[in-house]
Amino acid sequence: MASGAAEWVSCARCRELTYGRRFERDLRVCPGCGAHSRLTAWQRIGQLLDAGSVRQFEQPVVAEDPLGFVDSRPYPERLRQAREQTGMEEAVVCVTGTLMRHPVVAAVMDFRFLGGSLGVGVGEAIAVAAETALRARTPLIIVTASGGARMQEGAFSLMQMVKTSQALAELDEAGILTISLISDPTYGGVAASFATLGDVILAEPGARIGFAGPRVIEQTIQADLPKGFQTAEFLLARGLVDAVVPRSALRPTIACLLDAQAPAQPSAATTAGECLVRDPGELPEREPGQVVETARHQQRPTALDYMNQLLDNFQELKGDRMSGDCPAVVGGIGRFDGRPVVVLGHQKGRDTTERVQRNFGMALPEGYRKAARLMRLAVKLGLPIVTLVDTPGAHPGIGAEERGQAWAIAENIRLMSGLPVPIVAVITGEGGSGGALALAVADRVLACSGAMYSVISPEGCAAILWKDRSAAPMAAAALRLGARDLLRHEIVDAVVPEPEGGAHRDPVAAAELLRAALSETLREVVAISPDDLVAQRRRRFRRYGVEMPRCI
């Protein structure tokens, strides 16, 4: 933004004039085009942290001119000028404070100071901030704005990438949450180190993020770049950031994430004795065709329906940090009955448009890799995992196979078998083959009474073994895929009743029945030690086909 008349501001993008006081009330975002203007470090701190809570670190003492560097001017002169113009000692300000009452350590960069470049002063300050967060066991928030490494410090600048990365690695090892907020621009050594190593990566709308700048890339490859290249939105679609968050929503969004490390809050006990069926004899016999029809009903509650009703402060997280974000798998962090949890699920969608957009709940490899990333985050933070399974199976397509569908499923199965946190899986609708199993290796596996779970769809089984897809009803009967048979064969531990006629008849009541079942089940598994959890989980899956299940 550039100043116009004394009380007016002109948007650098659309040139719309805005009254200065309104511009500040809108957090320096253009009301016309939504452009997010750059903030100083102290403006950012004032917007994010609670008033009166901020305490600034002393700037660490470092070698300011390790090379004696001179270009058109000596480097010390450039430092002195930057300090005079900004009133800052370096390109980052590190503070302690609170954000909506959550204690945090924050390191906030300022592009005005030599382009927010990464030198020894910035690297040391980031490392000290991380060490402070480690000692206090307090989440670390890093806000980036940088053109890259500071050339005047040569290889000393390069080494700060390692210093800051290993500082964040120590927070990983200690289970301390790290949140990265990327603002425009964030490039070079900052992007290739601490900016992109947070547990959660948020970005402001339009923020440009990358290693090499667009001009360098264009000159190197001699080709035009795609529209929106390196913007936050471009990278969100490619699974590299968790969310693009407008400035007005940053405080509550970050507060929801910080809530994951707040202690569990006691909640009223839920009696689940009548909400979990453990005896298959209590479940009615159902025609196989009816089982399949109910499990696939288009109006059954989706994973997001359940998440939004059952969780407080739910924050969806996206992307596998490798290649993309799969809309058929959703997940994030929230509170269930006062307890922070990571929740994952297949998302089919409701109408035809949404179902097509979400691949009918059939996950791509990046969906399973996103799930794996969030499960590892759950382990880091010591949070239980709940999975909601509802999929015909993994996506059968050329692209999925090219990107390693089988590998992604296998990795999830191996990963879940050894996670040292409680896992509860619920088959809420259709549990299809390995695509379902990749989210269902759990300490307790529940099935909704209208659900089904099988190695293959009835149609697929009929086509292969009967050589006739019309034999699907016979295949469904032979596969014994309904909740009653799943419980009888001990594939599931218990069945969650549904409202009369199925969960689609009363989704709100269905969610409350699931709440009671999950509450009881989570209380049971969180009391088990991590070593015992893993041992019991592995024994559970080891015994299938060896120990004969009960027969009723």
Image: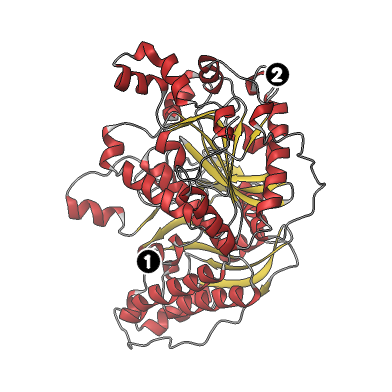
Q: Furthest residue to the left?
A: 222
Q: Residues within 10 Å of mark 2 (few under 14, many from 20)?
A: few
Using the image, tell me which numbered label, if any, was put on residue 148: 1
Q: Earlier in the sequence, mark 1 or mark 2?
A: 1
Q: CA distance from mark 1 to mark 2?
A: 61 Å
Circle 1/circle 2 CB separation < 8 Å: no
Q: Which quadrant holds residue 298?
A: top right
Vertical side of 218 occupied by 361: above or below: above
Front-lying residue, 296 or 361: 296
Front-lying residue, 92 or 323: 323
- Give the amino acid at mark 1: Gly
- The residue depicted at 56 percent of the width and 56 percent of the height is 536
Vertical side of 61 occupied by 236: above or below: above
Mark 1, mark 2: which one is toward the viewer? 2
- The residue depicted at 48 percent of the width and 25 percent of the height is 354
* Residue position marked by numbered label 2 in the rendering: 500
- The residue depicted at 36 percent of the width and 42 percent of the height is 365
- Percent of width and height locating residue 301: 61, 27
- Percent of width and height locating residue 192: 37, 64
- The residue depicted at 61 percent of the width and 40 percent of the height is 493
